Amino acid sequence: MKKSIIFVLFTVLFTIFISSGFGAQAANPASIFYLTWESNGSSPIGYQGKNLASVGCVIKVTVQPLIYSGSGYSDPSKWQYRWYLDGEFADVDGVGIEQYRFMVKGYGSDSKEVKVNITFPNGFVQEKTIIIPIINPKAVIKTTNKSIALRNETINTNETEVALMVVPYFFSNTTKLKIKWYEDDEYQNGNSLFIVKKTEGGNSRLVKILVTDYIDSLIRAIGQIKINFLGI
């Protein structure tokens, strides 16, 4: 019975030794880093989501190391990095290059693939890949009057006029945008603010907004809402 207890204790202690000491030396380097990304795509103040990327945006990909004591790879500044974009060498290679930046170019792509090869000080090579979604910019129409509700892209109101504004999302530069309003498919004068008025014989309006990049008109966003003027 004593021998059995001693054997069990020995096994437990040996397991702890392996996992905390020697085992850490043999840890797979693949488990000690991952990739994150961020975009300079624009968004309004108060937006709490992730800034997504569209054509023209700059994306930064960063290696995030998870430091394991005794692993031998605790200093990422000594690692050798080699970066790839969509399967092609990005001409970025060197020691300590933990970040890679690139501009989203080309149309029709719904994602970008970034891969990094890392050579550790002991010569071990590991790679990691991240897929970054590329979307079309968004144009969200809102009312300036908080008492007027906008639900499911529709406004039902007893007011005789509605003031609208557009909020662009995920453009690379919101200071250089062209804004065009359309009422029942007819172009209207207006920029960031547009007023829709009720008229005799017309109780419904379809309002559309076209927002384009000032330099590249193919970078664009379209939004629309329907306004129903109620009452007499």
Image (spheres, rainbow, N blue to C red):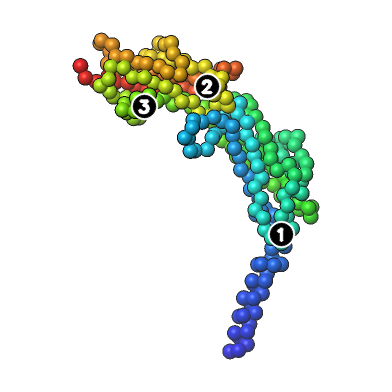
> Splitting the image into 4 quarters, where does residue 12 fall?
bottom right
The disc at residue 96 is none
* Mark 1 closeness class: few <14, some 14–19, many ≥20 residues within 10 Å: some
Residue, disc 2: 220
**Is 195 rendered above or below residue 53?**
above
Mark-to-mark CA distance, 2 and 3: 19 Å
Q: How many marks?
A: 3
| Quadrant location, the C terminus | top left
Question: Please, what is the three-letter code of the amino acid marked with disc 3?
Answer: Glu
* Mark 3 closeness class: few <14, some 14–19, many ≥20 residues within 10 Å: some
Residue 197 drawn at (x, y percent) = 32, 14
Residue 208 drawn at (x, y percent) = 41, 19
Residue 179 drawn at (x, y percent) = 48, 17
Along the line of sight, the residue nearer the viewer: 146 or 228: 146
Residue plotted at (64% across, 71% down):
16
| Residue at the left extreme of this rendering | 232
Residue, disc 3: 153
Residue 130 drawn at (x, y percent) = 62, 42
Label 2 vs 1, first from the N-terminus: 1
| Residue 225 as seen in the image, left or right of residue 231 | right
Residue, disc 1: 71
Question: At numbered mark 1, what does the secondary structure look like: helix, strand or loop?
Answer: loop
| Residue 173 as seen in the image, left or right of residue 162 | right
> Splitting the image into 4 quarters, where does residue 207 fall?
top left
Mark-to-mark CA distance, 1 and 3: 55 Å
**Is 160 rendered above or below residue 133?**
above
Residue plotted at (71% across, 39% down):
83
Label 1 vs 3, first from the N-terminus: 1
Question: At numbered mark 3, what does the secondary structure look like: helix, strand or loop?
Answer: loop
Question: At numbered mark 2, what does the secondary structure look like: helix, strand or loop?
Answer: strand
Label 2 vs 3, first from the N-terminus: 3
Question: Please, what is the three-letter code of the amino acid marked with disc 1?
Answer: Ser
